[in-house]
Structure formats: structure tokens, C-alpha cells
Amino acid sequence: ELKQKPKLGRIDEMNKLLKNSALTVAALAIAGMTTAPQAGELNVVSWGGAYTTSQIKAYHEPYTKMTGTKINSIDYSGGLAEMRAQTESGNVTWDVVDVVIADAIVGCDEGMFRPINVDMELAKAPDGTAASKDFLDGTLKSECFVPLIIYSTVFAYRDDAWGGKKPTSIRDVFDTKNFPGKRTLQKSPVNNLEWALLADGVPLAKIYDVLDTDEGKDRAFAKLATIKKDVIWWTVGAVPPQLLADGEAVFGTGYNGRWFSAIAEEKQPFAMLWDGQVLDIDGYVVSAKSKKLDEAMKYLKFSTDTQRLADQAKYISYGPARKSSGPMVSKHAVLGIDMGPHMPTKYADQGFLTNFKWWADNSDEMKERFAAWLLQ
């Protein structure tokens, strides 16, 4: 259980001509020829890179093999601007879109995404468990959203630092005496305020209760100030692994998939600190005005079943959002290593899910205060 805490397929013109032209049909009949229907197409939008590759391998290619439907994989950088523009213009060309939960909630409220009856329209678990009971608790956050993966923003550290001494908790990140060296943190109040409170002794379940008070906000900034002079702030996700690789930092925050790549693929001397990981959900929505709605829903059912979500973990270290997929997670398709220990869901009890509502209500205030605090 998770604790509370980014071109429409065209109809073949030849098919149209063959259908509407009696002359052509007659000619084909005389020649004894038949015409096979052309496969359909879907436009599926996602974030690119290794993540999209994992979807192509686990979802797209098997679906095309099974149905003949071509999946056009389109990359975007997240947000709702493009989807909103398509909806407002009446020219929706994206059929299925991979989004973060916060965008799913907003887009659903605005009518851009189609509501989904989870138990009626999605696959059951192999043992017959209804889909609504099979997705991890706390992940079905919007009636338009189907969760795919659980990823996390998490600390990693130089495994060869401190003479073999190993950090074990988020408190060690804030302990510059026993664990000296630079830390690299994202230049944002999000996550950093929560980590500061955890390091100051606030239980996981109470983070947002405390942060919701003036005293709690003061407490978070005060704790963050204790390491401020030791922080290198980052704004691009590729930076933290590079800073650790160069020896410029000993701790760094980043996406667990990037850390996995650095550790398992690039053989960097890093290790993960799962304590305090901030879990997040990524998943699919279907465009409410898709011109391929029936096909989009068939693809959605296929791509979010138990086997597909387990298969995706062969290519990237993000945890499948179904309970029934977890035991089916196997080895990396290329590296051959067991992927189970690299799933953030394995350590879910050490982390928390971002409180999206709290940040929606407090984001502007906290960003303004954080910017001012950086200048102090």
C-alpha cells in the first residue's frame, strides 16, 4: 500500500476507393482477386527515452503482433498544453497519452479524457480478482486514469565515500559531520521540504499534517538550511548522476530509473538509499474525442493487464502498478539481472506518495518562499 505523502492513424485511401468504386470491384472480381483490409493505427504519446522503449517492447509490439494495429509512438515533454489545444481546436490526433496523476486529474475535470469503468473495461488479474482490487492501493486517483508504473525520486550516494561507512536513512543526508561532502538536490521546494521534515523526526504518515501548519513550514526550511551551504542545486535530471560520477557530490536526488541505469548499466560506484523515497504514479488516459476510441480502449485493456505491466519491468526499473504483476517481475531483458530488488514498490513502506492536493493548494506560496530562501 502506498502511503500518502510527461497524428491520427489515417484510413487507407485505396481501401476507400475499392469500397466505393463499382468499376474497380468488378475488375478485381473478374481477375479472381481479393483485397485484404489494411491494419488500423493508434497514436500513443509518452515521454521518450528508455521509458518509451520499455513500452514499445512490452505493450506496442505485442499488441501489433496480436491485432495488426500499428502503434505510432509519439514523444512529448509532459503537461496538458498540447492536449488542451487539440481538444479546443476539435482536431484531436492523440489517442492514448501517458501522464502523471496530477495532469490526469485536471484533464479529466476539463473533459479532455474519457472516464473509464475499471472493472468493466480493464482486464482482471489472472486469478479473477477485479481490476479495481488489483491495482496498488492509492493509485486509482482519477476516473480517467489507469496506472502503469510506480517510480520514485530517491537519493543515491557514492558507495566508495566515507571509508566504507554506509548511510541508512534520510537523516544521514542531513548529517554533514558523519557523512561530509556535497549534496545535489533539485532546485524546487517539492520533495525537499518533505525530506527535511522526515530528517527532523516527523513520521511518514504525518508529513503533510505538519507541513500544513506555519510552524511546520518554518521547521522544514530551518532543517533544509542546515545543509544549504553543502548543496549543489540541479534543474535537469541528467545532472545528479554526472555530479556523483565526477566526484563533485556524494549524495544526489534523482529518478530511480536514472540511478538504476548508472549503477547497473554504467557500473558507477553508486548505491540507492530507498529511505524517504517519494513515490509517484504514471499511467494512461484516453482522449475523450479520439477518432479511434474503440481501438484505443482495446489497446488500453491489453497494455494494462498483469502480464504487460510485469513485462515492462524487464526493460526499466519502475514498479508495475498491479499487485498481481509484482510476483511476475523477472530478469532484465538485456542485463539478465533480477529486477525485483530494483523496483521502488519493493520499498514502498520506506517512502510516501506525494500529496498532490496539498501541493496544488500551496505550490505558488512555497515556490515564492523557496526562491526567496535561496537568496538569503
Image (cartoon, grey):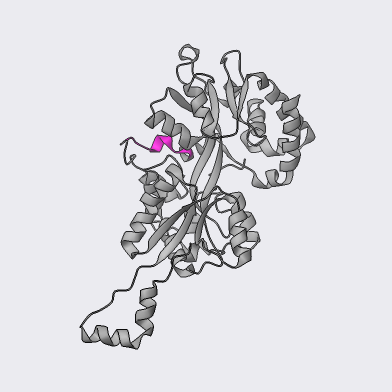
Image location of residue 353, percent across then percent down: 59, 42
Q: Which residues are magenta?
A: 337-344
Report if residue 340 lies within the magenta region: yes
Residue 240 x, y percent position in the rendering: 53, 28
Question: Is residue 227 found left or right of 163 in the rendered image?
Answer: right
Outermost residue, right side: 214
Q: Which residue is rendered at x = 63% and y = 30% of the image?
A: 195
Locate residue 3, reporting x and y percent. Answer: 58, 42
Task: Indicate whether 8 appears above or below 147.
Answer: below
| Figure check: 243 above or below 298 | above
Q: Quadrant of residue 180?
A: top right
Residue 135 or residue 281, whichever sits in front: 281
Q: Is residue 133 above or below residue 249?
A: below
Query: Measured from the top left, where is residue 164 in percent x and y?
Result: 45, 14
The residue positioned 61% from the left and 18% from the top of the image is 175
Magenta span contains residue 201: no
Q: Nearer the viewer, residue 323 or 195?
A: 195
User: Which residue: 56% across, 67% down?
Assistant: 289
Quarter of the image with the C terminus is top right
